[in-house]
Amino acid sequence: MSLIRYGIVGTGYFGAELGRILNNLDHAKVTSVYDPSNSEDIADELGCESSSTIEELCSREDVDTVIVASPNSTHKEPVLLAAKYGKNVFCEKPIALNFQDCEEMIQRTKEENVVFMAGHIMNFMNGVRRAKQIINEGVIGDILFCHAERNGWEEVQETVSWKKLRDISGGHLYHHIHELDFIQFLMGVPERVSMSGGNVVHTGEQFGDEDDMLFITLEFSGKRFATLQYGSAFRWSDHFVKIQGTLGAILIDMQNAKMILKTTNEEEYILHETKEEDEDRAQLNKNSEMDSAIMYGRPNQRPPQWLQSMMINEMRYLHSVLQGKEIEDEFKPLLDGTAARDSIATADALTLSLQEDRKVSVVEVMK
Ligand SMILES: NC(=O)c1ccc[n+]([C@@H]2O[C@H](COP(=O)([O-])OP(=O)(O)OC[C@H]3O[C@@H](n4cnc5c(N)ncnc54)[C@H](O)[C@@H]3O)[C@@H](O)[C@H]2O)c1
């Protein structure tokens, strides 16, 4: 096995933890980081150098793969620069905030023949992997309908995070693209979509400008449907994906941290790697000041153990691909940016639907 050297762009809550995880893998080493606010500190902690620009990091000879974990609206520049210098890329979700940017990133990474993996971490959740296996074995039959909710209540915070600003994060739909992406993984790209909602109560200076209630309908070929809710104006918080098939159903319950298969009876499975991680997540959801469905950490926090375990699975997978592991067919669209692009296309179509108050065909925005 050869040593893979990683450079990280954006070393906040997520990027710094990805760096810690990578440094713990065999034959992996973080060699450089770039972040406009904490590069030096994180470089000291990770035992690497700090680059003073993104281009410097991407062009370094001792960087083989670039990890992009900066705010959502800033992903394109480092991805294109990484491709320019022939480096593989792992880019956090959402990879971009519109279809056209996704296309450009895919095109350039493809031309340079580099990996372009999207950080769609739900693929590395134990319960999700088990659900996919059960579905592939035909246990719940054909999927007819999926329903997801990612709802909570946002209180006033000390400062307004970039995660609450539409131009930078894209708002709930783009920032929390996980559930939409997972449903598309199971059902494909929808034909027509519609969205209603808006910024209902989180208005004024102490809040960001993202919509706090979103109600989504996806129509797939063959009379298959999905509905999703996202937002931070729900006092009754919930976080789950329900998959309804012709023979059975699956609940991926991220609020109470468990997975349930329902056929003639109900079977319960763990959601994360261990029962303790599940209990921790369920407890955290009960106690947190802001529901974890709508909140993600701050730069000086560490992710909880259940999330770290998923990040470890994800980084191990990336590292194994870079070491030459063959990519399974179902993961190919995750490793070339196309699954991520297709989710953003649907998000764009939904955004247009809300703006123009009509149903939108997803192909309309795919140009
Ligand atoms: N997969 C997941 O479950 C998950 C969870 C959390 C965050 N994320 C993603 O990770 C990324 C980072 O989120 P976070 O929670 O670490 O945010 P954060 O605010 O904690 O960290 C972002 C860091 O990026 C730095 N930064 C700002 N502008 C930059 C630029 N132009 N270039 C490089 N760095 C820049 C900031 O100084 C900060 O340190 C986002 O894309 C987010 O969506 C993914």
Image (cartoon, rainbow, N blue to C red):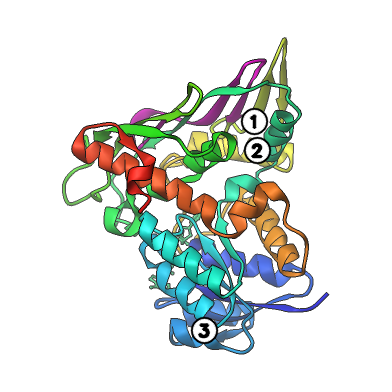
Question: Judging from the image, what secondary structure is the residue with disc 1 in?
Answer: strand
Please tell me which residue is depicted at 54% across the width and 30% down the height of the picture: 241
Q: Which mark is residue 100?
A: none
Please tell me which residue is depicted at 38% across the width and 43% down the height of the picture: 363
Within 10 Å of disc 2 (Cα), the crowding (few <14, some 14-19, many 20+) is some
Within 10 Å of disc 3 (Cα), the crowding (few <14, some 14-19, many 20+) is many
The quadrant of the picture occupied by the N terminus is bottom right
Within 10 Å of disc 1 (Cα), the crowding (few <14, some 14-19, many 20+) is many
Q: Which mark is residue 128?
A: 2
Q: Which residue is disc 3 drawn over?
A: 57
The reply, left or right, for residue 118 in relation to residue 288 is right
- C-alpha span from label 1 to label 3: 41 Å
The quadrant of the picture occupied by the C terminus is bottom left
- Magenta span: predominant SS is strand
Instruction: Using the image as rendered, state which of residue 166 and residue 146 is in the foreground.
Output: 146
Is 121 in the magenta? no
Question: Judging from the image, what secondary structure is the residue with disc 2 in?
Answer: helix
Instruction: Using the image as rendered, state which of residue 128 and residue 139 is in the foreground.
Output: 139
Is 246 in the magenta? yes
Q: Which mark is residue 258?
A: 1
The reply, left or right, for residue 8 in relation to residue 364 is right
The earlier-in-sequence mark between 1 and 2 is 2
Q: Position of residue 112 (x, y in %)?
A: 57, 75
Please tell me which residue is depicted at 56% across the width and 55% down the height of the picture: 303
Q: Position of residue 199 (x, y in %)?
A: 23, 39
Whether residue 303 appears in this view of the structure is yes
Which is in the foreground here, disc 1 or disc 3? 3
Whether residue 300 appears in this view of the structure is no
Q: Are marks 1 and 2 in contact (CB under 8 Å)?
A: no
Instruction: Using the image as rendered, state which of residue 33 and residue 343 is in the foreground.
Output: 343
296 over 109 or under it: above or below: above
